């Protein structure tokens, strides 16, 4: 299985796909079939190195602090790694202990493993802290891998929840996450193969045994199971493995086809109940209520749904038949989520009892669950869609997600995490050191360390700059390699530049994303300003013969924007969110000496930027504490009328790094009625346990809502 890293990198995350038309670049997406010559590809992580700036700081924090935190937690009793060790001991004939933790806890370890492998692909650039952390990660991998290899059943099955409980029947409950866990292992194995330049095949061979087992077990052939995964993920892993197998020589092309066909089978079996091996009850929670090609409304569990939509888009990239079959559904689903079921932060899924989608425009801020994994799933889906439709709307969405819905998962110290990302809280929220269901922290780490794959798309004739992140990348047009070096001051300032290096002059179109939030802009090539306007797909396109040393400068103004939701979102009538550039801001009570839910903000006033080197005043070895605060005038009510105040806002991702206190993204534009209990504490000679101050003066005639009174 000899293979070069360059070719491997291209195939792991670069898939053939079709382009399409878009009605309005910032708003709508409508895929349609095009010719093979118009296919786009992601420039993969392994071809892009984030070299400095905002996300380099977060990658350093991830490698030096978050991954060690994750390793320590998954190695604890219920953290998942003990199960893999015990499964290995069982197969070795050694003394072992039983299963512990959540039934899907294998997946947490697999994502940590994947993140560890990505960490080893990051250029340390001489940073002693990064070098030391990478050496520890490398040593830990060598400690773990032998256990991984021995934990697998001889037939390829790999899920310790069942391996360590052999009396239980495998695949008898589709919601027990067997396929989900195996999918995350396959992705971890691919990351390991990539980080070793294809020289270490141990985990890859184990992953192939897993996939071969699944391909033999599931399908419509004699003796196979017609069944779906309760939690989608395996589809993405199978498609990635299929792409790699296409490059591995004799014997692997057939495997590649089997894996992609199995991914398609898992997708197309949803909504098809005849002959099922297990009765799934057509549950809407896991999107089994109708065939995927007929689904037009996002329903059910938000992570499962968006992993499924991502798989539909990725399969469309390599399968022309699915491209046609899924096009309408993908367009309708994307518009439904983006325009009617998404918060200003990019967060999705508000219902905490099901972590899922509600009806259109049902977006209550105090119940804005917005699981971190759902934000990451949204990024994955939009990255896949960007290959099907070369419009900048997907890149705009990814930018909103990573800075707002995702990044705030972790604190400045890299050791505490949010699973949920609420947009408001009257009492304040605190991050946890870890979770029994710890899907979000390692999902964050693998996303931050593979963020390079979101920066560029490429076709045979064009380079698309999706994200403005400082990096160095290698691309090629025909036989001509081109190096791209980007310097960017995002997210604090909207300017930067790209320098192109090449051995010979090359014709291609450079497409710069026009950010949806930008005001005015300037673009210069070699110091000369260009007269440009964004095209219908949202790109500032420059077509020319490029030469070695060409420099493209960009500068997008970052006005402070007051963003209101449509009137259909009734909970936000009279409120506004505040955005500057890609960052959504929020107010915390620690900065504002008034009740932030009841004071008003002046949307006509000019905001003042205030730079702080460390928001919480602590030492900042990784450079993640420095940011711009916003100062904006407003008013509060008092017994004499109103009083002028000044709001202090911070980026939403930076919340909950200081005192636990009230926080809100949406701020009042007009004075709101205040609950009576805000002004006085009610007392009584007797109260019923169910009594609440909220029942005072609430206007309800229901006996259940009455505050207790006695003669």
Image (tube, rainbow, N blue to C red):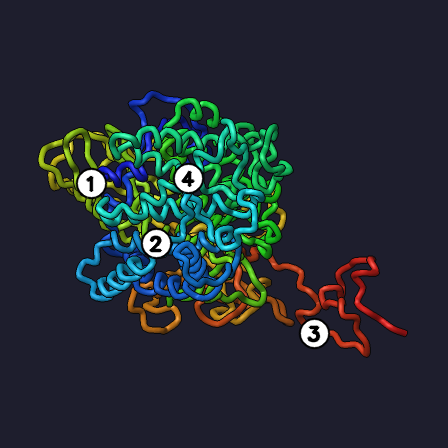
Q: CA distance from mark 3 to mark 2?
A: 51 Å
Q: Earlier in the sequence, mark 1 or mark 2?
A: 1
Q: Earlier in the sequence, mark 1 or mark 4?
A: 1
Residue toward you, 493 or 424: 424
Q: Residue furthest right?
A: 711
Q: Residues within 10 Å of mark 1 (few under 14, many from 20)?
A: few
Residue to which mark 2 is pinned: 115
Q: Position of residue 1 (x, y in %)?
A: 24, 39
> Which label lies toward us, 1 or 2?
1
Q: Is residue 709 left or right of residue 683?
A: right
Residue to which mark 1 is pinned: 4
Answer yes or no: do the residues labelled 4 and 3 have beta carbons within 8 Å?
no
Q: Which mark is residue 680?
A: 3
Q: Label 4: state its secondary structure.
A: helix
Q: Residue at x 46, y 27 (%)?
A: 327
Answer yes or no: do the residues labelled 2 and 4 have beta carbons within 8 Å?
no
Residue to which mark 4 is pinned: 236
Q: Is residue 451 left or right of residue 156?
A: left
Q: Label 2: state its secondary structure.
A: helix
> Which label lies toward us, 3 or 2?
2
Answer yes or no: do the residues labelled 1 and 4 have beta carbons within 8 Å?
no
* Residue 269 seen in this snapshot: yes
Q: CA distance from mark 2 to mark 4?
A: 17 Å
Q: Is residue 215 left or right of residue 60?
A: right
- Residue 90, placed above or below residue 72: above
Q: Residues within 10 Å of mark 3 (few under 14, many from 20)?
A: few
């Amino acid at each position: 299985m000899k293979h070069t890293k360059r070719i491997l990198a291209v195939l792991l995350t670069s898939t053939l796909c079709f382009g399409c038309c878009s009605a309005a670049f910032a708003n709508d997406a409508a895929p349609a079939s095009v010719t093979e010559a118009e296919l786009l590809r992601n420039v993969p992580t392994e071809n892009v190195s984030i070299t400095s700036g905002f996300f380099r700081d977060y990658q350093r924090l991830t490698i030096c602090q978050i991954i060690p935190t994750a390793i320590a937690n998954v190695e604890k009793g219920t953290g998942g790694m003990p199960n893999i060790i015990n499964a290995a001991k069982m197969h070795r004939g050694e003394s072992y202990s039983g299963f512990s933790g959540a039934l899907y806890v294998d997946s947490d370890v697999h994502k940590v493993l994947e993140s560890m492998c990505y960490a080893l692909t990051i250029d340390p650039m001489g940073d002693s802290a990064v070098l030391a952390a990478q050496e520890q990660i490398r040593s830990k991998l060598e400690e773990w891998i032998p256990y991984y290899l021995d934990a697998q059943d001889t037939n390829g099955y790999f899920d310790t929840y069942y391996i360590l409980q052999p009396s239980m029947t495998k695949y008898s409950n589709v919601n027990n996450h067997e396929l989900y866990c195996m999918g995350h292992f396959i992705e971890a194995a691919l990351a390991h193969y990539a980080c070793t330049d294809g020289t270490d095949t141990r985990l890859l061979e184990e992953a192939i045994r897993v996939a071969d087992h699944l391909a033999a077990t599931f399908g419509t052939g004699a003796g196979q199971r017609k069944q779906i995964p309760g939690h989608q993920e395996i589809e993405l892993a199978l498609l990635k493995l299929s792409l790699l197998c296409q490059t591995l020589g004799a014997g692997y092309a057939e495997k590649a086809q089997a894996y992609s066909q199995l991914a398609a089978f898992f997708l197309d079996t949803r909504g098809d109940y005849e002959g099922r091996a297990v009765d799934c009850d057509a549950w809407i929670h896991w999107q089994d209520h109708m065939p995927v090609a007929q689904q037009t409304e996002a329903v059910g569990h938000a992570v499962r749904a968006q992993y499924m939509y991502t798989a539909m888009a990725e399969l469309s990239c390599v399968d022309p038949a699915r491209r046609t079959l899924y096009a309408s559904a993908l367009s309708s689903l994307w518009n439904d989520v983006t325009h009617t079921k998404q918060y200003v932060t990019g967060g999705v899924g508000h219902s905490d009892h099901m972590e899922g989608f509600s009806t259109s425009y049902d977006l209550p801020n105090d119940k804005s669950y917005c699981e971190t994994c759902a934000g990451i799933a949204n990024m994955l889906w939009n990255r896949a869609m960007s290959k099907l439709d070369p419009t900048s709307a997907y890149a705009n969405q990814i930018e909103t997600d990573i800075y707002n819905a995702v990044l705030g998962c972790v604190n400045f110290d890299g050791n505490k995490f949010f699973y949920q990302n609420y947009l408001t809280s009257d009492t304040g929220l605190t991050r946890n050191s870890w979770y029994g269901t710890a899907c979000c922290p390692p999902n964050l780490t693998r996303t931050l360390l593979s963020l390079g794959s979101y920066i560029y798309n490429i076709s045979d004739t064009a380079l698309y700059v999706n994200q403005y992140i400082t990096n160095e990348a290698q691309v090629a047009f025909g036989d001509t390699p081109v190096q791209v070096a980007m310097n960017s001051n995002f997210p604090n300032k909207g300017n930067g530049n790209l320098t192109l290096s090449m051995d010979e002059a090359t014709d291609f179109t450079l497409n710069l994303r026009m950010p949806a939030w930008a005001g005015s802009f300037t673009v210069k090539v070699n110091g000369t300003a260009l007269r440009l306007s964004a095209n219908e797909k949202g790109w500032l396109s420059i077509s020319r013969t490029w030469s070695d040393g060409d420099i493209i400068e960009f500068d997008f103004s970052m006005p402070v924007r007051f963003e209101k939701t449509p009137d259909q979102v009734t909970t936000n009538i009279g409120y506004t969110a505040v955005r500057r550039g890609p960052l959504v801001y929020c107010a915390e009570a620690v900065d504002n000496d008034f009740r932030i839910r009841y004071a008003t903000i002046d949307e006509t006033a000019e905001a003042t930027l205030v730079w702080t080197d460390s928001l919480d005043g602590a030492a900042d070895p990784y450079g993640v504490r420095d940011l711009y605060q916003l100062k904006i005038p407003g008013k509060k009510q008092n017994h004499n009328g109103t009083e002028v105040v000044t709001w202090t806002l911070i980026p939403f991702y930076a919340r909950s790094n200081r005192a636990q206190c009230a926080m809100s993204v949406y701020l009042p534009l007009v004075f709101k009625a205040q609950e009576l209990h805000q002004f006085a504490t009610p007392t009584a000679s007797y109260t019923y346990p169910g009594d609440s101050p909220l029942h005072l003066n609430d206007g309800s005639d229901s006996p259940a809502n009455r505050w207790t009174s006695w003669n």
